[in-house]
Amino acid sequence: MTIKLYLDDDSRPFWEGAKDQKLMIQQCEECQKFIFYPRILCPHCFSEHVKWVEASGHGRIHSYTVVHKAMPPFKDQTPYVVGIIELNEGVRMMSRIVGERDQISIDKPVTVVYEKIDDEVTLPYFQLSET
Ligand SMILES: [Zn+2]
């Protein structure tokens, strides 16, 4: 599987963090709220003072679906689960949910795991966890 990332300065810390097995999100230095996806302005108070911080890696399943038809490079991996994860920090992130598919349900706790695709790309996925 090959995935081409189109990095820019706004998203690079997220992808560099994933390579180091760190889930990076932004936090506003004015209102302290967490931010994801990456932006140059806080969406809550419009401050330009946003910083990168490492998230806990824990959250809950807000929603999910089972993918049966996928585009390359994922089409060989169907069926798989993609979900919206609400991190403990309050932001929501779309990602793969791995593990026993019949155990996955809304509101269950998940923890980040990392899938190294190649030397350039590591994807943060989530798996069911106790808390
Ligand atoms: Zn703010």
Image (cartoon, rainbow, N blue to C red):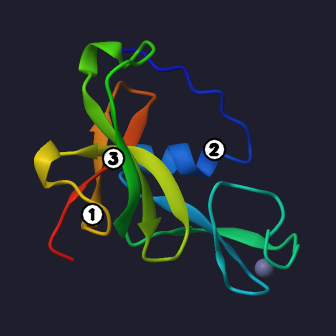
Give the x, y percent position of residue 102: 12, 47
Q: Position of residue 80 (x, y in %)?
A: 27, 32
Percent across and percent down for residue 43 are: 79, 68
Helix, strand or loop under label 1: strand
Q: Splitting the image into 4 quarters, where does residue 119 fall?
A: top left
Report the residue at 69% width, 70% height from top. Answer: 51
Figure disc tally: 3
Other residues around mark 2 within 10 Å, as few (<14) / some (14–19) / many (≥20): some
Q: Which comes before the other along the chain, label 1 or label 2? A: 2
Is residue 101 left or right of 76 when viewed as pictured?
left
Relative vertical location of residue 27 with respect to residue 2 in this rendering, above or below: below
Write down the quadrant of residue 29 in the picture. bottom right
Q: Is residue 56 above or below residue 120?
A: below
Q: Quarter of the image containing the C terminus?
A: bottom left
Q: Amino acid at mark 1?
A: Val
Residue 81 percent location from the top left of the image: 30, 39
Residues packed near mark 1 inside 10 Å, few (<14), some (14 to 19) or many (20 plus):
many
The reply to whether residue 100 is in sight is no
Amino acid type at mark 3: Tyr
What residue type is disc 2 on? Answer: Arg
| Label whose residue precedes the other's in the sequence (1 or 3) | 1
- The numbered disc on residue 130 is none
- Numbered disc 3: secondary structure: strand
Question: What residue appears at the point 64 percent right and 54 percent down from the top-left corner?
Answer: 37
Badge number at residue 12: 2
Question: Residue beneath label 1, please?
Answer: 110
The residue depicted at 66 percent of the width and 46 percent of the height is: 11
**Secondary structure of residue under mark 2:** helix
Residue 13, visible in the rendered structure: yes
Q: Residue furthest bottom?
A: 31
Disc 3: which residue: 125
User: Which is more toward the observer, 53 or 46?
Assistant: 46
